[in-house]
Image: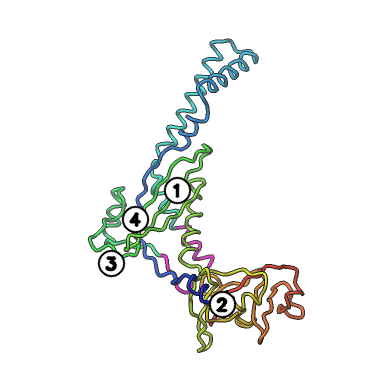
Amino acid sequence: MNLKALGLLILMAAPTFVSAKSANIWSSIPFIRGADLCQYQQAYSQTRSEYMHDMTSMASELMQAGAKGKEALDMLLAFDALYDKNLRLAMQYKYMDVTLENTLKSYLDSYYTSYPVRDRKVRFRHMNDIRSVIRAINNNQRIGNMPADSYELVDYIAYGSYSLAPNCNGNIQVTITLVGSDGFTKNFAGLGKPSVVMSQIASRIFEEFERTKFPTTLNFNGRTITLLGSPNGSVGETFNPNDAARTCRYMGGRLPNSNELEMISAYGDWNGGIGIGRSVWAISSGSEALVYHPGLRNPSPVRRMSEVNTRKFKYYCIK
């Protein structure tokens, strides 16, 4: 296969990506209580004979410690009843949905505080007037009703599910589903303590909507640069910068030079740019394909491939 045919094949295989749009989400997130995976795990982790063997062993240990037969039995029954009582209390899930909904929102806001963006994409929006919101809170009710034109007001409706995790140490498994106006869904999951589990999901939602997606366009002092990415629609990897340069030509673009790489990095991963980080990048320098090593600043981070230890380089194409 000649190079021209290979280039055409790569272009045909490369998917088209669109930058993430704004995501206005209905502020009320109903949660469905799922199966108790902890109880399921306990029920099926031991056979009846294994359970009886464990109980017999514990009774024997109590009697060796000085307890009489009836005393040992009473103690075992008391411990078993106490465990069941605590489990029932934990399984009441009282106000768990409120906790999950509000911690998700607060964690997401904290990510926006820690990683500022010029154009925030994810926001939660009430579809009812403020008096209805306050009335629902005062009556201990879920906030808001869905009007018929919901998708004219928001981009996504969210709902979630939660259940006790099978490790039985107080963790819960949580899922969040975003349903778009086109009916397609985005799903996110987390596992952890109720007070922190939503930080995982908030992080994934933030990354889904705020991380740079290709193609995207940046303006440098009146000059427009389009970031094409690589044929798989993301930042690519290569073992040779010359191969990356050839791929970019097939895509109708080129590798960035060192100045462009640094300017694009200044935008950051959340504002339409691509951060350099600690990775070594394939770049262009005139007619040559070189590498940019951020850890080798003296005399310059621009090096030949033979001057650096790594043999795997990241790259993206621009035009």
Mark positioned earlier in the residue sequence (4 or 2): 4
Q: Amino acid at mark 2?
A: Cys
| Label 4 crowd (10 A; few <14 / some 14-19 / many >=20) | many
Q: Which residues are magenta?
A: 106-122
Give the structural element (helix, strand or loop) at label 1. strand
- Amino acid type at circle 3 is Glu
Spatial distance from mark 3 to mark 4, Cα to Cα?
16 Å
- For disc 4, the marked residue is 28
Circle 2 is placed at which residue position? 317
Looking at the rendering, in which quadrant would you find the N terminus? bottom right
For label 1, the residue is 174
Q: Amino acid at mark 4?
A: Ser
* SS at mark 4 in the image: loop
Q: Earlier in the sequence, mark 1 or mark 3?
A: 3
The image shows residue 86 at horizontal and vertical percentages of 47, 31
For the residues carrying marks 4 and 1, which lies nearer the camera in this image?
1
Q: Earlier in the sequence, mark 2 or mark 1?
A: 1
Pointer 3 or 2: first along the chain: 3
Q: Amino acid at mark 1?
A: Val
| Cα distance between the residues tagged 4 and 2 | 41 Å
Judge left or right: residue 243 versus residue 16. right
Please tell me whether mark 4 or mark 2 is closer to you in this view. Answer: 2
**Distance between the alpha carbons at the discs numbered 4 and 1:** 16 Å
